Amino acid sequence: MSDDIKNLLEKQGRAFEEFKGALAAEEKARTTESEAKTAKLNDELTRLAKDIKSANDRAEAAESAAARPNRGDGTKSTPEEIAYKAGFFDYIRKGNENGLRDLEQKALVTSNNADGGYTVRPELDTMIDRVARAVTVMRSLATVRSINGRSLKKITQKSGAAIGGWGNETTAPTETGTPALVELELTPGTLWAEPRTTQEFLEDSDQNVEAWLADEAGIAFNEQEEAAFITSTTGTGVNRPRGFLLETPIANASYAWGSIGYIASGAAGAFATASSSVSPVDAFTDLLHALKPIYRANGRWLMADATVATVRKFKDGSGNLQWRPGVTVSEPYVELFLGKPIEYSDSMPVVASNSYSVAFADWRRAYTIVDRLGTQIIRDALTAKPYVKFYVRRRVGGQVTNFEAIKLMKMATS
């Protein structure tokens, strides 16, 4: 564990103890001053939790990079890969395509063309993915598949077969039922970003142009992807991933495949209060157990920052906070609520009337993301002079692939 992470964990521990004390004081005498202190400490806990997770991600990335000499998989780069790296670097910096064209003519690379763009180097593509994952929670939670065809067809079993029964040695067995199978097709849409810079920036040898490009493209991809995986501004999911909140919600007691079951919070546009017949913790417990045990074991909460700040104050019937910093061997540096990890996403709706502001799922089983080929890039030094534009594109799709593995909380009485 690095010193930075240790320091952050110590700060988190102190902030947690202060938060508990401030919350107790607020409950005894609710004043503007006590509420402001609790809110400030709540914000500090949110910031520290994110800083700890980011620091841990950076440490893991650095450790992984150090263990990946040369190409990244423990093998040495081939002469063609070395040539491609040099040619790609020359193309990014100066717009010189000769090196890449020579490789194409020698049939050493086949996925590039000047009109459709050049495929970025594998190392740069990994950098872009790492930036995206660092700020896009859905990519780190869901199953991610790379495909070469136009779509991914996935067969899912939505019900089990009747496997037999009881009887004596003369009982004639009946034919077992067949499981219900459905075919899902995930078709990628085109996601693009267009960072721009000056030629002078590209010419300065002391600048890490590839890191800049990876950061700019990764952040732009993140902003578009995260919203698309959760919901969609078009409301249809056409030409982009289909967000899980676009699926039909239904009261969990009436759940059927193709819809997502929900549990009501117990209050209109809010969480239930501790004095109501259904406490906020009761609703979360019901949501937790709405998932079958096979999915519940790997379940994670997904909420916006503001929702987590509210949930952090919830107590059980004995007055014990149900939120924990969550430094454990199995889940290092992850916050816990009711013993399950919390993930943040500001693409989740904030608490409002009839909003679905909390999701609980085994995300690996619930949602699948598909990436078509690699990231393509076109350098344009003409249409926005004196700037140089980089049109970066990738094809990404995604949708719910197991409706049983995800449940929602609706901010309503029913």
Image (tube, grey):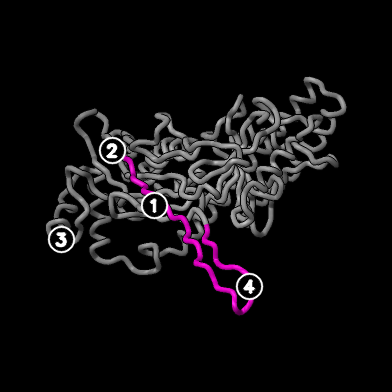
**Residue 382 among magenta residues:** no
Q: Earlier in the sequence, mark 2 or mark 4?
A: 4
| Mark 3 → mark 4, Cα distance in angstroms | 67 Å
State the residue in front, 353 or 203.
Answer: 353
Rendered view: 180 above or below 77: above
Q: Please state if 258 lies on the left or on the right of 83 as rendered.
A: right
Contact (Cβ within 8 Å) of mark 3 with mark 1: no
Q: Which mark is residue 183?
A: 1
* Quarter assignment of residue 73: bottom left
**Amino acid type at image mark 2:** Phe
Which residue shows up at 57% across the image and 43% down it? 255
| Mark 3 → mark 1, Cα distance in angstroms | 38 Å
Q: Which mark is residue 390?
A: 2
**Amino acid type at image mark 3:** Ala
Q: Earlier in the sequence, mark 2 or mark 1?
A: 1
Contact (Cβ within 8 Å) of mark 3 with mark 2: no
| Mark 2 → mark 1, Cα distance in angstroms | 38 Å
Contact (Cβ within 8 Å) of mark 2 with mark 4: no
Q: Earlier in the sequence, mark 3 or mark 1?
A: 3
Which residue shows up at 57% across the image and 47% down it? 361
Q: Element at badge 4?
A: loop
Q: Which residue is mark 3?
A: 107
Predominant SS of the magenta segment: loop
* Quarter assignment of residue 281: top right
Q: Which residue is most to the top?
A: 32
Q: Position of residue 166 (x, y in %)?
A: 63, 70
Q: Is residue 391 visible?
A: yes
Q: Which residue is mark 4?
A: 167
Question: Which quadrant holds the N terminus?
Answer: bottom right
Q: Position of residue 295 (x, y in %)?
A: 59, 54
